[in-house]
């Protein structure tokens, strides 16, 4: 449905996107995960035909977008990262305008508007000015505005940024219904939990490059450890000694918390026994699976959040 | 077409929903136009405004009284007597533009100076240097009046009799050429004889200015009076329409900043629809501003389209279109809204000033005239003047319309050429 091959874009000296190739089939949700400045928005701009790439090509349903009025643009819906709404106009007037840009009018426009309001759950606020909406409601309207012409491919640029958990869940529900309706979604975010929850496949971007591209379990296999054991304890200081034990890949002691990266779950009882034998007073133990965060850290040497 | 009109309607909604924009575009030109119209002469009226002249009479003779009387009858001025210190203070503080001082012995020495060589009395003219036009006008008027009054006194009145006999006596002792002397004696003796006649038959006597002047301001037709509001409302409509044009340009830069430009570019819309719809809505708003402002001027100040209505509508439409193109130009060459705003306001104010919207352009020095003709807004001003109080026919609107349309074309072409279509 959506394919990009070897996209490149530079702004002056800065190579914002280099050699990005992506593919999303019908009904698939493709995630684009990366820190600030990774090149996500620039990539979306090229996919939507807003920014001409320096090299590479984009195809929608197998065809390239040519010209301003290309019919292919009707298959695309763009949800910009900014709240791209006319705050002074009502929600209805906003949706009607964006519907009209795709040629909708009269009964068809009213029908689509009702459908979209229903989907994002804003029907009761239809007559209010967009500027009076809460942050989360504006985000939902921002999404709604891209859906008026019922596009097959929806490009979402950080659709949940700065949103409370309740609105975020509402937006996720909306996206899941779109997915269920067979739409192809491209979803950029710098929240790894979002990418993990929603996406069939995820491309991790950094400095304009795709550094990993797979489904979730495939990406997690890139993590150097299979589990992290977190032990809260007292009277223990010998981190270097732990690292010497069989099966322990990483060890880090901060305050009274010891984090151990291990290869196999089976090694856990032995580890705990060893710690007790060293005189450690264990207070609490839990284990964590590796996350995309761990993968990003492993691939780039930086944490996703501070990158 | 659906998209085009949806975009136009959106612009109109945003404009009329924005109280600041409405005040700036409709209320401001009406208020400021009323002010300028009032100070530049107000509505149609028969009388000219009078220049206030203070007269300091230190002579208090028959001549100066007579002079004061005729100054009071003068049309263009409003004469009042005052003490020297008082008059000086009034001119210095700007309460009166001109004051004249008639020195002691003025009546006598003036009529003597008429016949005899020697010192002439001095009239001091004190004037406000910011009112040189009024001071020259008063000087001219004074010369005529004094000539008339003094010569009349010399040919009648007591002072005259004394002066003539005195002149005859001094002539006796003079070393003048004999022939010349006797001719002059003859003239003075005739004056003496004339002065001795009973007053009734003499009919006043003396010199008088050998012509009378009748003023006829040339407006649309005889009987149509100049209405300063026609010019001031036109001028202010032009100014605030250009400001509206700036808002259009800034608004387009804001679209870019707010991500809306991405939405617009993602939709299957041609560049013509995107820019054309904005130009269309700006032109419509411009026409509305002109209609409202001139309707108000008509109702409140009786400003009429004395010339061709079609010509007026043509000039207004062409200027509205030019304003729209000006907005597009600002959107095309402006980088950020903030940076564009300051520069655009400066450029607009210069353009408005040179167009004659504040002060009529005929007051500009000669060398500036061709320069201002290069400014489209000047043509809008001239076109509106021509179609309103000058009462010209439609043919006088053709040049302004053509120039304005060319201006719109140039702005439009540069705007399309320099426009950043990419939504980066
Ligand atoms: N129009 C532009 N001119 C110059 N540089 C640009 C422009 N647009 C983007 N960049 C640069 O390109 C790089 C990638 O930007 P982009 O907006 O694509 O990142 P992003 O992944 O969307 O980041 P964020 O999570 O902050 O939205 C950044 O370094 C940015 O500064
Ligand atoms: Mg971005």
Image (tube, rainbow, N blue to C red):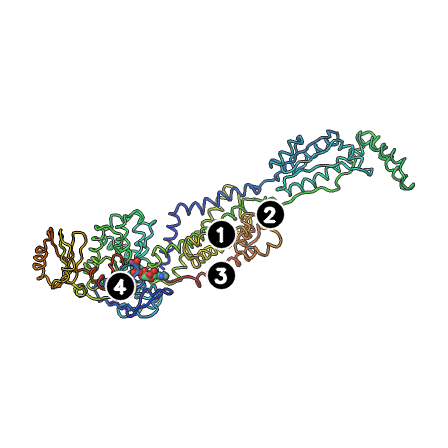
Residue at the disc numbered 3: B410
Which is more foreground, mark 4 or mark 3? 4
Does the image show residue A80? Answer: no
Q: Is mark 1 in CB contact (under 8 Å) with mark 2?
A: no
> What chain does badge 2 belong to?
B
**Placement of the C terminus of chain B among the 4 image quadrants:** bottom left
Q: Closer to the N terminus: mark 3 or mark 2?
A: 2
Question: How far apart are the alpha carbons under marks 3 and 1?
Answer: 20 Å
In terms of image quadrants, where is residue B134?
top right
For disc 4, the chain is: A
Give me the C-alpha separation between circle 1 and circle 2: 34 Å
**Residue B232 percent location from the top left of the image:** 53, 46
Callouts 3 and 2 close, C-beta under 8 Å: no
Circle 1 SS class: helix
The label number, if any, that marks residue A290 in the structure image:
none
Query: Above or below — where is B144 with respect to B198?
Result: below
Relative placement, left or right, of A289 versus B180 is: left
Q: Earlier in the sequence, mark 1 or mark 2?
A: 2
Q: Which mark is residue B219?
A: 2
Question: Which tag is nearer the camera, tag 1 or tag 2?
Answer: 1
Per the image, label 2 sits on a secondary structure element best described as loop
Q: Nearer the viewer, residue A191 or A100?
A: A191
Q: Give the x, y percent position of residue B295.
A: 48, 45
Disc 4 residue: CB within 8 Å of ligand 1: yes
Looking at the rendered image, the disc whose residue lies closer to the viewer, 2 or 4, is 4
Density class for disc 4 (Cα within 10 Å; few <14, some 14-19, many ≥20) is: many
Give the x, y percent position of residue A270.
7, 60
Q: Secondary structure at mark 3?
A: helix
Mark seen at residue A205: 4
Residue tagged 1: B346
Horizontal relation, residue B327 to residue B383: left or right: left
Asked whether the residues under marks 3 and 2 belong to the same chain, the reply is yes
């Amino acid at each position: 449905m959506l394919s990009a091959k070897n996209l490149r874009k530079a702004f002056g000296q800065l190579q914002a996107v280099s050699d990005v190739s992506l593919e999303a089939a019908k009904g698939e949700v493709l995630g684009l995960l990366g820190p600030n400045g990774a090149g996500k928005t620039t990539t979306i701009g090229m996919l939507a035909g807003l920014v001409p790439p320096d090299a590479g090509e984009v195809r929608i349903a197998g065809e390239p977008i040519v010209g301003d009025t290309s019919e292919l643009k009707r298959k695309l819906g763009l949800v910009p990262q900014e709240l791209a709404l006319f705050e002074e106009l009502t929600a209805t007037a906003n949706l009607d305008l964006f519907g009209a840009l795709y040629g909708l009018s009269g009964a068809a426009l009213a029908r689509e508007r009702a459908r979209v309001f229903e989907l994002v759950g804003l029907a009761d606020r239809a007559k209010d000015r967009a500027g009076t909406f809460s942050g989360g409601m504006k985000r939902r309207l921002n999404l709604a505005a891209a859906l008026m012409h019922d596009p097959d491919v929806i490009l979402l640029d950080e659709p949940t940024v700065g949103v409370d958990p309740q609105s975020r869940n509402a937006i996720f529900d909306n996206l899941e219904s779109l997915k269920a309706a067979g739409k192809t979604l491209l979803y950029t975010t710098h929240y790894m939990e979002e990418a993990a929850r929603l996406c069939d496949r995820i491309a991790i971007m950094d400095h304009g490059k795709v550094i990993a591209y797979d489904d979730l379990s495939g990406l997690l296999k890139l993590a150097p450890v299979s589990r992290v054991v977190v032990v809260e304890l007292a009277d223990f200081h010998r981190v270097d000694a732990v690292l010497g034990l069989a099966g322990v890949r990483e060890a880090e002691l901060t305050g009274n918390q010891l984090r151990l990266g291990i290869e196999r779950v089976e090694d856990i009882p032995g580890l705990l026994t060893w710690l007790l034998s060293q005189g450690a007073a264990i207070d609490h133990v839990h284990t964590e699976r590796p996350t995309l965060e761990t993968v990003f850290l492993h691939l780039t040497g930086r944490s996703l959040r501070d990158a | 077409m659906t998209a085009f009109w949806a975009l136009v309607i959106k612009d109109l909604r945003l404009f009329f929903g924005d109280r600041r924009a409405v005040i700036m575009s409709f209320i401001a030109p009406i208020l400021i136009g009323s002010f300028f119209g009032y100070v530049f002469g107000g509505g149609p009226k028969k009388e000219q405004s009078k220049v206030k002249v203070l007269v300091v009479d230190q002579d208090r003779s028959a001549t100066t009284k007579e002079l004061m009387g005729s100054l009071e009858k003068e049309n263009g001025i409003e004469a009042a007597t005052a003490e020297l210190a008082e008059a000086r203070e009034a001119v210095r503080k700007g309460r009166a533009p001109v004051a004249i001082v008639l020195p002691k012995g003025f009546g006598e020495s003036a009529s003597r100076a008429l016949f005899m060589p020697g010192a002439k009395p001095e009239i001091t003219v004190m004037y406000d240097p910011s009112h040189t036009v009024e001071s020259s006008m008063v000087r001219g008027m004074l010369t005529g009046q004094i000539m008339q009054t003094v010569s009349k006194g010399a040919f009648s009145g007591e002072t005259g009799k004394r002066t003539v006999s005195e002149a005859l006596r001094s002539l006796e002792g003079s070393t003048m050429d004999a022939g010349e002397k006797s001719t002059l004696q003859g003239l003075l003796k005739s004056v003496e004889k004339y002065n001795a006649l009973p007053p009734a038959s003499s009919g006043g006597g003396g010199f008088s200015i050998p012509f009378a002047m009748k003023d006829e301001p040339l407006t649309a037709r005889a009987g149509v009076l100049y209405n300063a509001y026609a010019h001031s409302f036109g001028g202010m409509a032009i100014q605030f329409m250009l400001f509206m044009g700036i808002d259009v340009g800034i608004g387009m830069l804001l679209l870019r900043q707010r991500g809306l430009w991405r939405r617009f570019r993602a939709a299957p819309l041609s560049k013509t629809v995107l820019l054309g719809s904005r130009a269309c809505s700006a032109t419509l708003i411009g026409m509305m501003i002109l209609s409202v402002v001139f309707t108000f001027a008509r109702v409140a100040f009786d400003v009429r389209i004395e010339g061709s209505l079609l010509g007026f509508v043509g000039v207004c439409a062409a200027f509205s279109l030019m304003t729209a193109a000006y907005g597009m130009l600002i959107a095309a060459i402006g980088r950020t809204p903030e940076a564009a705003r300051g520069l655009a306001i400066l450029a607009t104010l210069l353009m408005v000033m040179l167009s004659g919207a504040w002060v009529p352009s005929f007051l500009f020095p000669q060398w500036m005239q061709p320069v201002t003709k290069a400014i489209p807004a000047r043509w809008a001003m001239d076109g509106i003047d021509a179609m309103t109080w000058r009462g010209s026919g439609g043919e006088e609107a053709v040049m302004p319309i053509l120039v304005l349309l060319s201006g719109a074309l140039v702005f439009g072409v540069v705007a399309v050429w320099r426009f950043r279509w990419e939504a980066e």
